[in-house]
Image (spheres, rainbow, N blue to C red):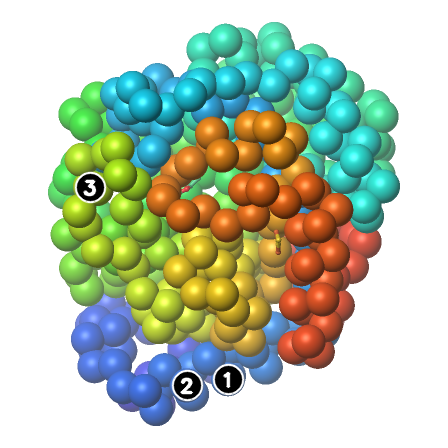
């Protein structure tokens, strides 16, 4: 298996059959080997710098009904909220002072936020913070909508593909959603010049090794600037309430493989990873991740943006999370930097 890991490192690609073998024949030793190699590659490309993104969860209304997600429309127990434009700008102001130079506007697919409203918010943020990157994470839209946001100044877009296998996709989502549309959105985003982020959940219900092979092949083909992966974690008010979580070891191994396959990719150690293990994010960085995404949402709404049970940091002010992460990163020899943290096209 080490041979396959070396091959992935050298050639940044494996065949489907090789991925299958690598994913189906895990051992502690090869896991460790991949993670150390990925950590080296991260250092070669990004040094000891860790980029931060200020996450602003601005609405938990959602028209979709994904079986895994706590803010799905059928969840009657979710207390719905929307931030106002002023609230959002206030989050940015605080964030800017704390050294954030990327803001991520994330929300459910909420019809209240029409294209005009999103465009206006994007314009205002970019006007007030011209030295900052703005990332949107608001789901599947039409090409026209994506173009309008881009022209308004949005730099990046996060839209996890969730799973690259169409049948697995159907088992995680109701009939009105399709994996094909999701992938088509991602291709459009790339075409429009967004730094684009795809990604999948680790250990989502019914995920097979074949599904994961497809995820890796799809990501190689799409060649996104960012990849978000984190463990699936059950939410009590969803159809998947009794399903097992994705594991730490699986997530760290896949992070490592992603760093080897896409050496320059912007790869967050996610909040979900920090939720399943107290040092999850640190271990994520030591396995190849180079981004952390602390929460800038007002504490008053934090507990309402519950995609899964037990989410960390729901009681902490933005400043606390920022300092906490700086300390955590320092302890593993890394440094959280004040920087937009754009994608690096070439090796440093
Ligand atoms: N566990 C882990 N991740 C989840 N997401 C949504 N619900 C869950 C869950 N129960 C992830 C999805 C989505 C991102 C914003 O959060 O991958 O794209
Ligand atoms: Fe939020 Fe540590 S990152 S408290």
- Secondary structure, mark 3, is loop
* Inter-mark Cα distance, 2 to 3: 31 Å
From this viewpoint, is residue 34 visible?
yes
Mark 2 CB near ligand 1 (8 Å cut): no
Mark 2 packing: few (<14 Cα in 10 Å), some, or many (20+)? some
Mark toward the start of the polypeptide (3 vs 1):
1
| Residue 32, label in figure | 2
Does the CB distance between marks 3 and 1 fall below 8 Å? no
Measuring 37% from the left and 24% from the top, which residue is drawn there? Answer: 78
Locate the N terminus and report the quarter of the image it occupies: bottom left
Mark 3 CB near ligand 1 (8 Å cut): yes
Mark 1 CB near ligand 2 (8 Å cut): no
- Secondary structure, mark 1, is helix
* Inter-mark Cα distance, 2 to 1: 6 Å
Q: Which residue is mark 3?
A: 240
Lateral position of residue 342 relative to residue 197, left or right: right
- Percent across and percent down for residue 42 are 60, 73
Measuring 25% from the left and 73% from the top, which residue is drawn there? Answer: 23
Mark 3 packing: few (<14 Cα in 10 Å), some, or many (20+)? some
- Judged from the image, the quadrant occupied by ligand 1 is top left
Measuring 72% from the left and 62% from the top, which residue is drawn there? Answer: 326
Whether 18 is drawn above or below 167: the answer is below
Q: Which quarter of the picture shows residue 142?
A: top left
Does the CB distance between marks 2 and 1 fall below 8 Å? yes
Whether 325 is drawn above or below 128: the answer is below
| Residue 36, label in figure | 1
* Inter-mark Cα distance, 3 to 1: 34 Å
């Amino acid at each position: 298996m080490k041979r396959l890991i070396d091959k992935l490192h050298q050639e940044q690609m494996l065949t489907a059959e090789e991925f299958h073998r690598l994913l189906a024949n895990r051992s502690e030793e090869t896991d460790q080997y991949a993670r150390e190699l990925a950590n080296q590659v991260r250092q070669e490309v990004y040094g000891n710098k860790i980029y931060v993104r200020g996450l602003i969860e601005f609405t938990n209304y959602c028209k979709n009904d994904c079986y895994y997600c706590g803010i799905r429309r059928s969840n009657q127990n979710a207390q719905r909220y929307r931030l106002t434009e002023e609230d959002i700008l206030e989050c940015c102001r605080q964030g800017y002072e704390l050294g954030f130079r990327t803001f991520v506007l994330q929300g459910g697919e909420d019809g209240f936020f029409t294209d005009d409203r999103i465009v206006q918010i994007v314009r205002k943020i970019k006007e007030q913070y011209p030295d900052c990157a703005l990332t949107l994470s608001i789901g599947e839209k039409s090409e026209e909508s994506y173009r309008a946001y881009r022209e308004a100044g949005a730099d990046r877009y996060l839209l996890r593909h969730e799973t690259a296998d169409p049948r697995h996709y159907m088992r995680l989502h109701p009939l009105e959603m399709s994996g094909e549309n999701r992938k088509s959105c991602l291709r459009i985003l790339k075409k429009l010049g967004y730094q684009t982020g795809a990604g999948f959940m680790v250990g989502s219900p019914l995920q097979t090794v074949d599904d994961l092979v497809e995820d890796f092949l799809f990501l190689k083909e799409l060649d996104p600037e960012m990849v978000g992966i984190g463990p699936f974690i059950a939410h009590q008010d969803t159809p998947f309430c009794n399903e097992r979580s994705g594991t730490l070891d699986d997530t760290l191994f896949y992070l490592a493989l992603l760093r080897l396959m896409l050496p320059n990719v912007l790869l967050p150690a996610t909040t979900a990873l920090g939720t399943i293990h107290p040092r999850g994010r640190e271990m994520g960085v030591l396995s190849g991740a180079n981004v952390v995404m602390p929460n800038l949402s007002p504490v008053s709404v934090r507990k309402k943006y519950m995609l899964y049970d037990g989410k960390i940091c729901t009681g902490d002010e933005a400043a606390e999370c920022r300092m906490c992460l700086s300390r955590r990163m320092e302890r593993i020899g890394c440094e959280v930097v004040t920087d937009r943290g754009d994608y690096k096209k070439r090796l440093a």
